[in-house]
Amino acid sequence: MVLIKLLVLTTTFPLWEGDSTPAFVYELSKRLVIEGFDTYVLAPHCEGAKKFEVLDGIKIYRFPYFFPTKYQRLVDGAGILPNLKKSNLAKIQLPFLFLSQLYYSMKIIKREDIDVVHSHWIVSNGLVGAICKKVFGIKHVLTEHAAGLVALNKFPFKHSLAGFILSNCDGISVVSSHVYDRLLEFVHPRVLNDTKRKLEIIPMGVNTNQFKVNKDKNELKAKYNIKSENVLLFIGRLAEKKGVVYLIKALPSIISKVPSTTLIICGNGPLKDECENLTKKVGMNDFIKFTGYITEEEKVDYLSMTDLLIVPSIVTDDGDTEGLPVVILEGLSMGKPIIASDVGGIKDVIKDRINGFLIEPKNSIMIAETVSELISNKELMLQFSKFSLKTAEEYDWNTIGKKYYLHLNIL
């Protein structure tokens, strides 16, 4: 049996073991190896990372895009869009990233005799994949998560650019119904039916076995010095679209109704100082714990300990929002009740008053009222927990990996 050689193009990929960069492209690539693809990944290099290594059967190449490499600012754990906002040097590096990625993609395709290119995000990876299809006549499959469309919307001639990329795709997947609708807004009516024919909704997944644990909550509270009866949890990058500031603003009202409550905020990001300063401003220092970066083992501990996972995501002024936050799938895998904003692809998974609550984004009052209602209703929390576990089964990586295998196996 001849293995299909697959080249994955991504700008989000862990740089080393323990790196805090979101790992969903890595997890998907591992499953594609298991499903039988000879898998190569091309991702941007960052100072301190290896330029080539093999992990879990994935051959990983990391390409430089600026010299000296220690001044590379565009791609790191914060993400391209936030980096563009905070760094003029990052803005300068954008065309260099595209050209370098295109050069190294062509180099690997020729050397390794690649059969299929799988690009994540329509720009710039999807554009590179489309050009490689035109040049080499190979197959190209695009997966859009959400942020690529935000970036595309800033380009001149964005509809023409989208038309070129999508017409040079043999398959297209999106991670949620929201991204599906948003993508079609860029499609010319003349080719709408052809695009829909190639388009599937396939979310990212979760390793449910990792979260099938039974840890004692009281022991965990003692381990992490949590003395409150109720534990609320936020896990994610401290970035604008995550909406954590609205959760912090909601806490005084929550504490007034449910005093024995602690909010644990896990993660780092560009808004870390702002979040900590806001906590002081609203007088919640004694009720909020910032952990910073956490390991996967610590994530399981915090999810085991918590009574309620809160995902207060928003749509930013420039249109950036969630595709489908992986932390929701992780929380569901542990049977946790979830309160989440009704944005992006979240409603594909959270069904209001069945496995969680959907709330308005940027509404601190609604967050506080919903948290207070749920904490005081143990029967409803048990109902949510039951349906959470059932929902999670649909998103296990073994199931999702097979869906992507069928989507990519187009030769």
Image: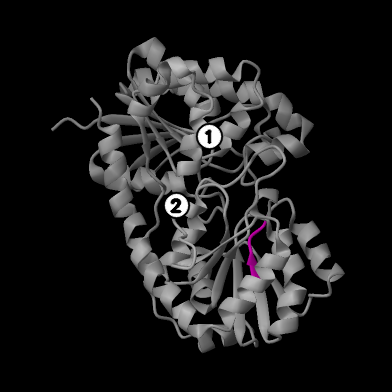
265 within the magenta span = yes
Residue at which label 1 appears = 182
- SS at badge 1: helix
User: Can the viewer see residue 262 in this picture?
Assistant: yes
User: Can the viewer see residue 104 in this picture?
Assistant: no
Q: Is residue 223 above or below residue 351?
A: below
**Which residue lies at the image location 24% right of the left edge and 30% below the top edge?**
4
Number of residue marks: 2
Using the image as rendered, state which of residue 91 and residue 283 is in the foreground.
283
Q: Amino acid type of disc 1? A: Arg
- Quadrant for residue 392, please give it: bottom left
Q: Is residue 301 above or below residue 163?
A: below
Q: Residue furthest top?
A: 135
- SS at badge 2: helix
42 within the magenta span = no
Q: In the visual, does 2 lie left or right of 8?
A: left
Q: Which circle marks residue 190 in the picture?
A: none
Q: Where's residue 129, x and y in %?
A: 44, 22
Using the image as rendered, state which of residue 389 and residue 99 is in the foreground.
389
- Quadrant for residue 44, please give it: top right
- Which quadrant is the N terminus positioned in? top left
- Which quadrant is the C terminus positioned in? top left
Using the image as rendered, state which of residue 133 and residue 399 is in the foreground.
399
Q: Where's residue 384, x and y in %?
A: 44, 72
Where does the magenta region start and end? 264-268
Q: Which circle marks residue 348 in the picture?
A: 2
Q: Amino acid type of disc 2? A: Asp
- From mark 1 to mark 2, how far is it between C-alphas? 15 Å
